[in-house]
Amino acid sequence: MGSKERIQRLKEETRLNILDAALEIVKEDGWQSLSMRKIADKIEYTAPIIYEYFANKEGILLELTRKGYIILFQELKAAKIQHELPQDQLEGMWMAYWNFAFKYKELYQLMYGVDMSCCEVIKAFPESEATTNIICDTIKDLMTANPINDDLVCRKYFTFWSVVHGLISINFVRKGTDNTTNQHILRDALKGIIKYIND
Amino acid sequence: MGSKERIQRLKEETRLNILDAALEIVKEDGWQSLSMRKIADKIEYTAPIIYEYFANKEGILLELTRKGYIILFQELKAAKIQHELPQDQLEGMWMAYWNFAFKYKELYQLMYGVDMSCCEVIKAFPESEATTNIICDTIKDLMTANPINDDLVCRKYFTFWSVVHGLISINFVRKGTDNTTNQHILRDALKGIIKYIND
DNA sequence: TACATTTGCTTAACAGTGTTAAATTATTTA
DNA sequence: TAAATAATTTAACACTGTTAAGCAAATGTA
């Protein structure tokens, strides 16, 4: 009776269907909108059967996260073997990382908790502009070129922001790491950017 | 009849109470756990009256976001006036930004969408280690020192990750900005770090 | 003072969420 | 064919945000 295996195969298939359906829903309407009943609808079952394949909703998310890491690793590996020199490999891998984030945006959000669930449309607050300005003004003060290239100011601001925000959010997610060490990293990175602000 | 104003003052007070209660709940149990009924409980009312002060739940979040920006701006300003030289001002402001993120962690999460709602406890996946390793290996390849300082490798990896992740998540949140320009920023930043990897 | 009106607040309800237990249907086994 | 097992659904529970209806107290008006 080989039907045992056939059934096993079918079960494995619906398991994958659940994951696919979940990701599809997220691609359409975001993580906020993902629900067990919607997944069930998509695979043409009712909600409770999902619990025969996953412990709960988080189980689905964990599985998708795992899938994300596997894909990411493959892309990194592919990028690495395209170069000989370590410095080229490193740059290539980080570019691959970057590309992964946009190609698999939903998975990246899941993996690294970049969730803009709250305040769906962050329409630039007037209050947020003030903070942008006070920093950009100082960047301008540092610039020797005349007239000042506003585009460059904006880019430098972005670089600063990315470094600091990245360090912060990674600290939030991986909260194990020592804070003073990271503050050291931050200070070094800042000094580096400031030093070469006129490039 | 000065009672009009007294009532106005009371209303303003409960409005603030709602915001305080919301933030308190989030501090205790995270954004995921915030609910209208819990807020109502805390201010000793029932849920519907909150809608007399805010359009909906998002209205509360928006107000807290605004508060966050106001506080952040004040901290930046305070940091700036403590220095004379622009480069010191800049470093001071970014350090203030950093400190703000940890001092007002919940507000920062709200403002910049750093939400680890999904997968509450991201227990280091084996799959995630593979991606960490493939990059750290390459960083080691680049290092001239012998024996290799593992701590430094880790720190360099963190720096890379922060820059890239920061740039990505800021691109997600502020999706208006041009992608190719950011890729340019990224490439420059990467080259910079790689260049000074032995410092 | 007596009535009408506005205000403040609550209860009840709706549609949605994740999740579990019971009931039901379909399939396999004896 | 009858019993046992598996597959799937229905019903329910405790939540969620949100709205409408109802009530009670305070206020305005005669």
Image (tube, coloured by chain):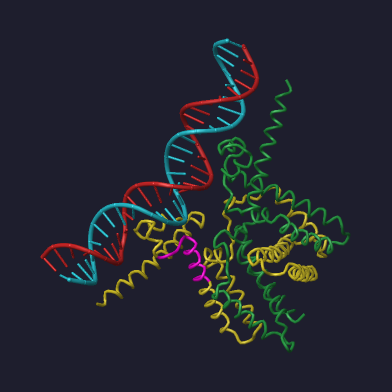
Chain colours: A green, B yellow, C red, D cyan
Task: From this view, report whether residue A168 is shown above or below residue A81.
Answer: below
Magenta stretch prevailing secondary structure: helix
- Residue at the (68%, 74%) spot, across then down: A190
Quadrant hosting residue A86 = bottom right
Q: Is residue B198 in view?
A: no
Q: Quadrant of the N terminus of chain B?
A: bottom left
Q: Is residue D25 left or right of residue A87?
A: left
The location of residue A162, given as percent across then percent down, is 67, 69
The residue stretch that appears in magenta = B53-68
The location of residue A140, given as percent across then percent down, is 67, 84
Task: From this view, report whether residue B128 is shown above or below residue A161.
Answer: above
Task: From this view, report whether residue A196 is shown above or below residue C30.
Answer: below
Q: Is residue A75 left or right of residue B3?
A: right
The location of residue B102, given as percent across then percent down, is 55, 66
> Does residue B141 show up magenta in the picture?
no
Quadrant hosting residue B192 = bottom right
The single residue placed furthest to the bottom in the displayed view is: A146
Quadrant hosting residue A37 = top right
Query: Looking at this view, is A156 or B155 the one in front?
Result: A156
- Residue at the (36%, 56%) spot, across then down: B46
> Does residue B56 show up magenta in the picture?
yes
Query: Looking at this view, is A99 or A193 the one in front?
Result: A99
